[in-house]
Amino acid sequence: MGALPDPFLRRLFWLAALLALLDYAAAASEFNPYRVLGVSTHASQAEVKKAYKQLAREWHPDKNKDPGAEDMFIKITKSYEILSNEEKRANYDRFGQTDENQHHGQAPQGFRHFHDNFYFDQSFFHFTRSTRDFTDSKHLLHHDHYMKEVVPDSFKRPYLIKMTSEWCFTCIHIEPIWKETVQELEALGVGIGVVDIGYEKRLASHLGAHRTPSILGLINGKVTYFNYAISKEYLRQFVESLLPQRLVEKVTDDTYLQFLNGWREENKPRVLLFDAVPSVPLLYKLSAFAHQDFVRFGYVDQGLTETLRILQQFNINTYAPTMLLFKENTEKPADVIQSRGMKKQLIDEFVSNNRFLMVPRLVNQKLFDELCPVKQFHRRRKYCVLLITGEDEAFVPVNDAFFAFASANTKEVLRFTYVYQWQQQPLCDALLKKEDMTPPQVIILERRSTTGKVLYRTVKGGWNGSDEDKHRLHEQLELLQRDPSFLTYDAMLPELNNEFASMFIIQWANAAYDYLSEMYFDFLHSNWREMMPIVSLIFSALFILFGTVIIQAFSDSGEEKPAKQKANESPKTAESSPNAENTSSRPPKKNFVEVTELTDVTYTSNLVRLRPGHINVVLVLTDTSKQALLKKFAKEVYSFSGSQTLHYSFLNVDKHSQWMDSLLELAPSSRPRDEEEEESTPSSKRDYTGYVLALNGHKKYFCLFRPVFTGDEPDCSRSSDEDGGGSRARSRGSSRQRSASTRQIHHKLDHLSLWMERLMEGTLPRHYVSDWPDLKTISPQK
């Protein structure tokens, strides 16, 4: 192929240069941070910040559904970044340049000498094949790496994760802020991660990322979304909000002794941080989170008048941050560091070297593994000198003597510890049972396997804390270092009890408080995508709860409900009630008893097929007496409505008059002699209004209550089946039934409650039948 003519190359060169100049002019003119924020070139920082907050709320993509809201929000964020930074603002005022368009003013590097081959790279047209630079590549996350390393590590430090992709042009705008934030937070100990959702779709789906760019926070295995405008200040505040609320305790002159003396209860050294800022610096909070399992942190504000006494007592230099670490001695720190530029590495090294008390208490298996590791090599032997003691005041001198001995013997191969016998009883039994000893005792042991095997030896003579005991223990420790075979006993130790398990409820309450705080934060900032599963769960639980209550309120108590009931045979409620078996958990209302009409439809289920042990109490009434008798009946039997074996019905004799005659004929014992004589004449017709039957459908017997009038004669109030001497009352009652005009109907059921008591006691006479009469025949209505 022949070479291109020289004039053509020159024209092409000038065309490229012209395009570069036009592109530069367009880039410089189309973006004006003052115009975007709507402030003048002389606006103060307060005015700039106020305008930014107002516009950010207005154009936030989650609240503004305008198609151009996202691009406008990015311009607003970038404008604030430029105008809030004095250096960037001065650079823009002088040269009209921002970080994005500064490279336009340089020579077009994509164009080579026109005598060489004509070549344009992608940067000439400002296309970017990948937005990833070296910073992002160093922090790229993959699914396996995230699950196996990042998630476990999030229990020691929070992570800030950016979601991006190859062709995310919006991500370019946040790159300067992201780089600056990463540089600052990574130095403080914050973990950084970058996920390319184009390549890591599985991880992106696991994190719930649906768009780029997105910022996520990870702590204790829980993911939280960042919902503010992307700026360094907001990202820093976001990381700080991820941390638990009570990591660092504020300490003053009045509380520092209580804080330092807490080592006995928590079994942890105490660190006091002295600095001159009102709020706890993020560096200290991150350090406290990383070492929360071993050390307790407190913060002293040197600028407060309430901290002058503690500053003077420990002679604190107020011109530089200071850290004091205390162990058992609360009057003198065990270690001190002071530095004007306190670094994370320095704090970690300081705490790691002092994370155990001089004589720590074995409170769980994890601490036992840390203090007394399993022997691996001969040169790395570690011996545990264990004091088995108690918490009573009688043991205090013994314990203090052991602490003093341990303070004077700080050899690397020895680790002094103690346990309370009643809290670690299985461990103490395994070590003391062979020699039948009682505390206090000192035992020297060496762990040989992770399964619990140890070699040990008990110091002879026990431990009383005397000089003789100290001398004897010192001699045996010297002998042990010369001859490891000195340990002659072996045992299998059980796993230690977790003495802090009782504090689980408190820890759970704190975790619940933190979780509710995060939920409030998410609701406040409309993070609906992340909160939707929780909202759905809450509404589902409420729906199930209220649905269950409504179903129970309107459910029928019957075991077999009729497929269809006639309107005039619907269940009647006497002052209404919960179901007959009282299955509802709610207490019934007063005088509220459910009474079902006994019809040909309900007859089989309420009598013939009644379950064994269940009784149906049936009131006999007429159309005219129904209302009065049902109210009286409910009042009399209400106190028995809680029984699971009693059911209540009524029988209308205007519809089924022959059924009562048939029932009494099947049980002659239920008829007294005077009634038999009266019914011998054909014209006689019995009035069964007010009778009450207790029907046992399974055993085929019934008990009978005959009404008596008690309005005038109290002596006549007993029912016919109460005793043998009541025949006179029955005679009077039956004579009075012939004249209904002289009787008040509701008095027919007087003292029914007494009859019900005898029914429950099982002392009423029982009248057996061979079979229950048929109820299908309905008497004609008059």
Image (spheres, helix red, strand yellow):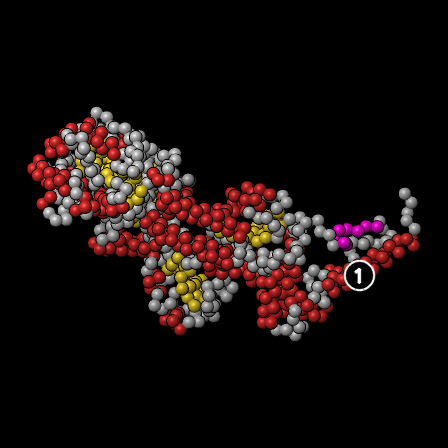
Report the front residue among 393 and 95. Answer: 95
Horizontal relation, residue 48 to residue 622: left or right: right
Name the residue located 57 percent from the left edge and 53 percent from the top edge. 215
Residue reaching furthest left? 725
Q: How far across and how far down the image is residue 669, in percent?
A: 14, 29
**Is 778 in the magenta?**
no
Q: Which residue lies furthest to the top in this view?
A: 770
Q: Which amino acid does label 1 sit on?
A: Leu
**What percent of the width, then of the height, locates residue 14?**
86, 58
Q: Can residue 710 be seen in this view?
A: yes
SS type, badge 1: helix
Q: Quadrant of the N terminus?
A: top right
**Height in image: 101 above or below 511?**
below
Which residue carries the number 1 mark? 22
Pick whichever, 755 or 683, lies toward us: 683
Residue toward you, 749 or 168: 749
The magenta span reads 118-125
Q: Which residue lies furthest to the bottom in this view?
A: 42
- Quadrant for the C terminus, please: top left
- Left or right of residue 775, residue 677 in this image: left
User: Is 649 left or right of 319, judged from the image as shown?
Assistant: left
The image quarter in which residue 351 lies: bottom left
Is the stretch drawn in magenta largely helix, strand or loop?
loop
Residue at horizontal 66%, vertical 48%? 166
Q: Residue at x 30, y 32 (%)?
A: 778
Residue 255 falls in image quadrant: bottom left
**Residue 372 visible:** no
**Which percent across, then down, holds residue 761?**
16, 38
- Expressed as whole percent of the image width and height from the top left, the position of residue 715 reads 9, 45
Q: Residue at x 65, y 74 (%)?
A: 42
